[in-house]
Amino acid sequence: MNRLWMAVLVVALAWAPGAKAGAAEGVDLAKLAGWDIVLADDAPPSEAYAAEEFRTFFGQASGVELPIVKTTERADRHVFIGAGKAMQAGPVGFGIEKLGDEDLRIVVRDQLIAIAGGRPRGTLYGVYTFLEDYVGVRFLTGDHVYVPKLAEKAELGPVDRTYHPPLLFRWTYYGETNGNPALAARLRVNTIGGDVKYGGKTGQGLISHSFGAQIPTAKYGKEHPEYFALRNGKRLASGDDWSQTQPCLTNPDVLKIVTAAVLEELKAHPERTNVSVCQNDNTEYCECPNCKAIDDREGTHMGSLLTLVNGVADAVAKEYPKAYIGTLSYEHTRKPPKALKPRPNVQIQLCSIECCQFHPLPDPHCPLNTPFCADIEGWSKLTDQIYIWNYNTNFSNYLLPCPNLRNLEPNVRYFVGHGAKGIFMQAAGDDTGAELSELRNYVMANLLWDPTRDGQKLRDEFLDLHYGKAAPPIRRYIEAYHNHVVASGKHNNCYGGAAQFLIDEGVIKVAMDAFDEALKLADDPTVKERVEKASICAYRAAVVPVWEPPGGKAPDAATKERVRPLARRLFELIDQYHVPNWNEGGPVQGPRQRMRELLGLKESEAF
């Protein structure tokens, strides 16, 4: 049975009402006047904050603001937040000793509600789960929480529900969460720090390029060129570590140096549960006889890398038996080895950079995806410590339309179904205002928290609640563009211009018409601003005839005249909504000047 569905079955059984709940009565949420919220005396900051969040949003939904207390004088009409003594002594009582950091349990019966979980985040996540699933609250963006009014009768329960999130590491890499710890907590993205009240972040760090810091050429290259990759008879012992060289992975001194760096990092950061030991971001792998012999034997350049990683892991296990060593299965190291296996304390993070933005990963007809699927199948036979680095935007053009919204759900399910324990959904980084980034952030975060959710329903939910009457034309544009790309039968990864992403005059017209209509339908200033921000992708597409003219031919005067007001509006919106970057590592200032030049604008003309 697929691992995801096995997990779903376990969770479904855990959520079923138990014997106690089956013989009990539920609660009418619309009649909690006179109740209180009970918080334990020793509650950590995240549980005190959870109580405040419950009071705030339940109060908005019910019109009743419940007091937060620490002592009780009656047996019923309490909402217990956290596993305090009063909760554990009553009919809804349970302990949290066996619950993980983010596990949660919700019990509703006999005029009592208990929400508690593992520390530090389980109770907080339990409150958000309760508010979403039983009150209908939706945490859409940093400044938009949808809170419906409770019906006159809102009966719930009895309930006895436990949830264990299938992913230990969840990161939607958008500025919408990276810069907003409160939203990250509400969406249960557990990789953002901030105030301790948000529950902190997982001890699992992102597995990423590390050799440039652990064995830099500036420190070792001059005296020990043999520590670095041999390429075409020359040691790459100088230059930029990250993009121009790799270490010689079979040199015993390299193993000692990297191991010492890892042990030092664990000593300096006792909160960390893993450390990266990873290739630099280039393919200048070592071709010395020793490295080549291992790679040839294993049929992959992962052979020599994993040999070193296993050596580091063996040394670390002696001093930090609970720590993991994470390495990237990326580009030349993505293919699993024939015989060599990762140590039990080694994590393998597969990277999908070559994969298709147009088709879901499990699509057997997509030539960009099938090799990746073969690799994850192979790795899943060698280890149960699989993590994922997935690519979810067009890194060449953050603002252009990107047709992968339909793939988010099947891709996340595919990863979890193959044993992934964590997923990094790389997107526009710390940027806000990237193409439909608020919608994407919401869908991704919800899928990482619960991979059984329906991606289409999540998209529709966000569109309807965030844009109101303006949602239908925006939805029409999204569906039309995705249909256009699928019908083409073409494929493209996470880099490319308008031509690669099939943005033509037809797509531009559909996008512009949709957002023009949406703006007319926006029925209040706040919704209008939301639509304007979302429309940036349409205006970015609209300047393609000048920015990336078909066939590379210079645009004629008529095309420039037509595009000029659209370009002005594009940069007005970029400024208004504080969009920092045009693409990965590329601020908007450069494209702004280039656009002026392409349009033939004078320095005195406003733009």
Image (cartoon, rainbow, N blue to C red):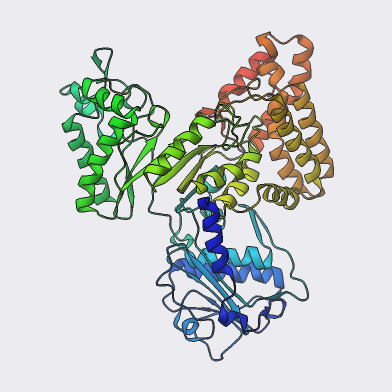
| Front residue of this view, candidates 281 and 386 | 386
Residue 537 in view (yes/no): yes
The percent position of residue 95, horizontal first and vertical second, equals 44, 76
Q: Quadrant of the C terminus?
A: top right
Q: Is residue 353 left or right of residue 17?
A: left
Q: Nearer the viewer, residue 331 or 341?
A: 341
Q: Position of residue 408 (x, y in %)?
A: 60, 42
Residue at 16% over, 32% down: 253
Rendering quarter of residue 500 = top right
* Residue closer to the observer: 463 or 1: 1
Above or below, 205 relative to 219: below
Whole-percent x and y of residue 183? 56, 54
User: Residue at coordinates 71% horizontally, 17% vertically from top-left?
Assistant: 545
State left or right for residue 340 relative to residue 175.
Answer: left
Q: Is residue 601 visible?
A: no
Along the line of sight, the residue nearer the viewer: 199 or 18: 18
Q: Is residue 9 above or below residue 311?
A: below
